[in-house]
Image (cartoon, rainbow, N blue to C red):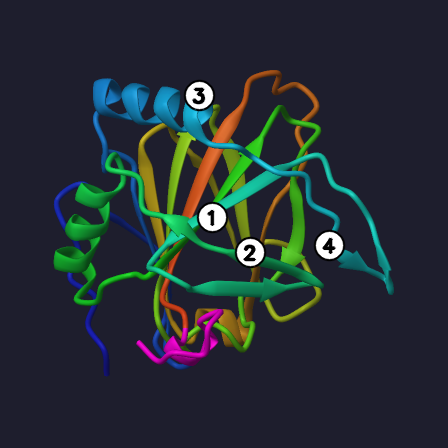
Amino acid sequence: MKTIELRASEQLLLDDHERGCFVTYDPNFRGPRDADVLFERLCCDTPFEREAPIMFGRAVEVRRRTYSFGDDGIRYRYSGVERVAAPWPAVLLPIVDELAVRLGLRFNYALCLLYPDGEAGIGWHSDDERDIVAGAPIASLSLGAARDFQVRLGKKGGACVNVNLAHGSLLVMAGATQTHYQHQVPKRSRCTSPRVNLTFRLLRGDRRVDGRTA
């Protein structure tokens, strides 16, 4: 039976030993000053792009904007969209190093999403694309406006986890969470401020653009 070791500031939001699914939350991963600097740098320096994922068989442009960072040549494909990683910016390298120590693996890719306001969200889904190393954790760093994050078992029913992701917080979905659970960031019309979300992932080395293995 897997044991989850928590840091002093961490919370265990989902503890499903039977299925091997775990979600942890650290509201204080980055202090307010560091979080402010990182948020400003990403907002100012990231050339966010429009996105039109395939939904119900057709491309639909969404309100959120995306960009990606990572190791040389790494790409990620999801919902008819392909994102080739730009080089890691210097501001993210210490975070990649810290996550490697904390989680015991080094992420090679981060999807960076800009939610301009509460009218931007993302519906129920699992991050279970073939490009992702199966069973590897996904670490989500939230910056800017606090937004609700929900988790549910399977593809129907209500949320079993609902947490308001704070500025500078880190949420980690580990084990087989992507196999058995879905998650979403619901729209919240009362939110008028932007949020930037970085989801760090471990992608398969054979998914490099030039075909090289990691």
Q: Is residue 145 above or below residue 99?
A: above
Tag 1 residue: 68
What count of labels does the image hold? 4
Magenta highlight: main SS? loop
Q: Which badge, 1 or 2, comes first in the chain's sequence? A: 1
Give the magenta range: 204-214
Is 35 contained in the magenta span?
no
Q: Residue at x 74, y 41 (%)?
A: 62
Residue 119: in sight, yes or no?
yes
Earlier in the chain: of badge 2 and badge 4, it is 4
User: Which residue bears the numbered disc 4?
Assistant: 53
Q: Is residue 39 left or right of residue 90?
A: right
Asked which secondary structure carries label 1, the reply is strand
Q: Read off the residue under disc 3.
A: 44
Q: CA distance from mark 2 to mark 3?
A: 20 Å
Q: Which residue is mark 2?
A: 83
The quadrant of the picture occupied by the N terminus is bottom left
How far apart are the alpha carbons under marks 4 and 1?
15 Å
Q: Choose between 171 and 150: the one closer to the eye.
A: 171
